[in-house]
Image (cartoon, helix red, strand yellow):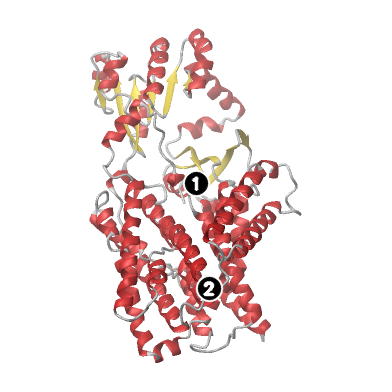
């Protein structure tokens, strides 16, 4: 019977994503659908699946792997402090930034969640529905990081301030409850040891990180096809830290969570993350979610009036615990997005499942009470994403284009500025030549400067841009301004050098500063050579229908996808891939990697959509 139940579970795990794709069910997370399917297949309805020791083991492995992957999802760069020494441009930008930073918004938001969750715990005890205040508080302060990340990816918000704020709140909503659950389990477990022994888990995690911190550099030199050393390391981390956790009287899920954090800090390759996701979400985790639904006996819940009353009360508790987030988010974001962010932060499932499993092991909660908390959590995962997708709209700061300032107006720079102004760039040109100003002012936005002295230009915001192009003929002046611009903090400075003597003398210094150089003879030589070797190149470069484009691959959806399998490959031609400081001539079977710079040709109508899709930060 064990084998038959497992076959049914695996068939359901295979069927769920296929059915969701077939019927275009995008408003529900896969985990929630799998729990619902488990309810249908379990004793609540068809009773086709029975619990067994084998399924219990697989379910426990599933929750351990889920918490491990949850630890790997935490983006620790969000917690990094900004450098104390800022460039003048960064200082100027800092003064124009909102009063409340993303980090401040997230910390204040989660602090409000902690306070409200404790109040909700006492509230349940006061009305006689649930007596364990601290377990209730832990459950109320959880947030489902996986569901939040999926929704933010869908809206392409992971790189935006609003998305980062919600992501950081969700990260805290997994880390803090996990720590709280550890102390809770240690306090109430009959086999618990001294609380200070829990610190041994952190010591073990730190030692493992120190021992393997250079692993992925060595990993590149080893044959990986038959050894899969990165996966072996991950399982070693999981088993070691789970064993240490259980030895000192803590819960194994804390060890799994820390194992995920350690692997994340080791900075694994994208292929490693894909393989671990495949093992977890391909086998163990669906079993855990489906079995959670199987163990949720709705017949018993409905038959008990006390438990039936708990479900809507707990659901309201999940919402009220997050309600103060709205007022914090309003300090920085608009009203509709504050509501959307609050609704998304109310979604919870992952840590709730883990906490309920721990509480049941400790006999601190009944099956009916556990079912009420779980069912209410499932409802939050249905309602939250729906409200978020309905109400979210782009913030004004997210719509800002890349700012490009051209210094020098001539027949070389003006046509480029005209073409850029039609796309993703906010272009302004500057000149102190009145003749050129009168000649080109009707063609593109130009500001006439009294002089080109660095101090005057800084004071007038000429260097307040993402990209500064120094396109004057005077190479000596371009050299001086390039150094000033980089010192001021301009991210990209592109400089024209027509004087070979100055270029040869200053090239090494400028390249060390990160200045990008070009000159007309080299451009002409390259173009003529390309025209001789590939006659169609000039037609392509000057065509009004198609052109050459470049984009950095940020969209994880296309990581490890072969070029021939890109869904829009019929609309583009990939000519070069720049990876690890070298060019790769791609074939149809060449797999793409995150951070590849893809050079492709396409029509000017198709190119924007392709660049946007490949460049999504998700």
Q: Please report whichever mark, 1 or 2, sits nearer to the chain's N-terminal start.
A: 2
Residue lying at the far bottom in this picture: please name it. 303
**Quarter of the figure with the N terminus:** bottom right
Secondary structure of the residue carrying numbered label 1 = loop
Q: How many residues crowd around disc 2 within 10 Å: few (fewer than 14), some, or many (20 or more)?
A: many
Question: Distance from label 1 to label 2 (Cα)?
Answer: 30 Å
Q: In the image shown, does 91 or 465 lie closer to the viewer?
A: 91
Residue lying at the far front in this picture: please name it. 194
Residue at screen point 53% across, 84% down: 41
Compared with 554, 481 (above or below) is: above
**CB under 8 Å between discs 1 and 2:** no
Q: Could you tell me residue 164's position as x and y percent?
A: 39, 50
Relative placement, left or right, of 86 versus 268 is left
Q: Could you tell me residue 179's position as x and y percent?
A: 47, 60
User: Would you say residue 560 is visible in this rendering?
Assistant: no
Residue lying at the far top in this picture: please name it. 501
Residue at screen point 33% across, 56% down: 111
The circle drawn on residue 554 is 1
The circle drawn on residue 289 is 2
The circle drawn on residue 328 is none
Secondary structure of the residue carrying numbered label 2 = helix
Compared with 615, 313 (above or below) is: below
Q: How many residues crowd around disc 1 within 10 Å: few (fewer than 14), some, or many (20 or more)?
A: many
């Amino acid at each position: 019977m064990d084998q038959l139940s497992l076959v049914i579970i695996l068939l359901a795990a295979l069927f769920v994503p296929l059915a969701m794709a077939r019927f275009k069910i995008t408003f529900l997370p896969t985990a929630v659908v799998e729990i619902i399917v488990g309810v249908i297949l379990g004793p609540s309805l068809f009773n086709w699946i029975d619990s067994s020791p084998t399924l219990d083991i697989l379910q426990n492995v599933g929750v351990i792997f889920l918490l491990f992957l949850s630890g790997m999802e935490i983006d620790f760069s969000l917690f990094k402090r900004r450098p104390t020494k800022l460039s003048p441009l960064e200082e100027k930008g800092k003064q124009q930034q909102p009063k409340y930073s993303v980090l401040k918004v997230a910390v204040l938001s989660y602090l409000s969640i902690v306070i409200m969750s404790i109040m909700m715990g006492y509230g349940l005890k006061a009305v006689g529905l649930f007596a364990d205040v601290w377990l209730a508080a832990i459950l109320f302060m959880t947030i489902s990081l996986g569901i939040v990340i999926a929704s933010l990816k869908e809206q392409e918000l992971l790189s935006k301030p609003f998305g980062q704020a919600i992501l950081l709140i969700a990260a805290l909503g997994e880390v803090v409850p996990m720590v709280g659950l550890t102390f809770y389990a240690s306090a109430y477990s009959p086999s618990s040891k001294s609380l200070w022994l829990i610190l041994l888990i952190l010591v073990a995690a730190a030692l493992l990180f120190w021992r393997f911190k250079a692993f992925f550099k060595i990993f590149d030199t080893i044959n990986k096809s038959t050894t899969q050393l990165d996966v072996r390391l991950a399982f070693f981390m999981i088993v070691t830290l789970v064993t240490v956790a259980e030895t000192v009287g803590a819960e194994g899920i804390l060890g799994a969570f820390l194992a995920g954090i350690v692997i994340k800090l080791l900075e694994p390759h994208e292929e490693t993350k894909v393989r671990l996701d495949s093992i977890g979400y391909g086998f163990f985790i669906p079993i855990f979610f489906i079995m959670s639904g199987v163990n949720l006996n709705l017949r018993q819940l409905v038959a008990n009036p006390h438990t039936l009353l708990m479900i809507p009360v707990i659901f309201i508790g999940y919402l009220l615990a997050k309600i103060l987030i709205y007022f914090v988010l309003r300090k920085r974001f608009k009203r509709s997005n504050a509501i959307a962010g609050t609704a998304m932060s109310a979604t919870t499932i992952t840590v709730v499942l883990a906490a309920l499993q721990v509480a049941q092991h400790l006999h601190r909660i009944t099956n009916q009470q556990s079912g009420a908390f779980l069912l209410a959590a499932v409802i939050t995962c249905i309602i939250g994403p729906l409200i978020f997708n309905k109400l979210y709209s782009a913030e004004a700061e997210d719509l800002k284009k890349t700012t490009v300032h051209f210094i020098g107006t001539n027949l070389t720079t003006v046509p480029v500025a005209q073409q850029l102004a039609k796309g993703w760039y906010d272009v302004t040109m500057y000149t102190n030549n009145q003749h050129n100003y009168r000649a080109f002012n009707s063609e593109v936005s130009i500001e006439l400067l009294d002089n080109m002295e660095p101090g005057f230009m800084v004071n007038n915001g000429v260097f307040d841009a993402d990209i500064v192009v120094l396109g004057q003929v005077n190479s000596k002046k371009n050299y001086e301004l390039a150094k000033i611009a980089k010192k001021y903090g301009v991210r990209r400075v592109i400089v024209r050098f027509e004087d070979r003597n100055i270029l040869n003398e200053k090239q090494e210094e400028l390249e060390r500063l990160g200045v990008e150089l070009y000159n007309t003879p080299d451009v002409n030589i390259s173009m003529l050579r390309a025209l001789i070797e590939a006659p169609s190149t000039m037609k392509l470069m000057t065509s009004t229908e198609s052109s050459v484009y470049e984009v950095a691959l940020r969209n994880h959806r296309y990581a490890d996808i072969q070029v021939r399998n890109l869904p829009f490959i019929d609309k583009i031609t990939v000519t070069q891939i720049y990876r690890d400081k070298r060019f790769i001539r791609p074939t149809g079977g060449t797999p793409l990697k995150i951070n590849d710079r893809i050079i492709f040709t396409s029509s000017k109508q198709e190119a924007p959509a392709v660049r946007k899709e490949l460049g999504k930060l998700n």
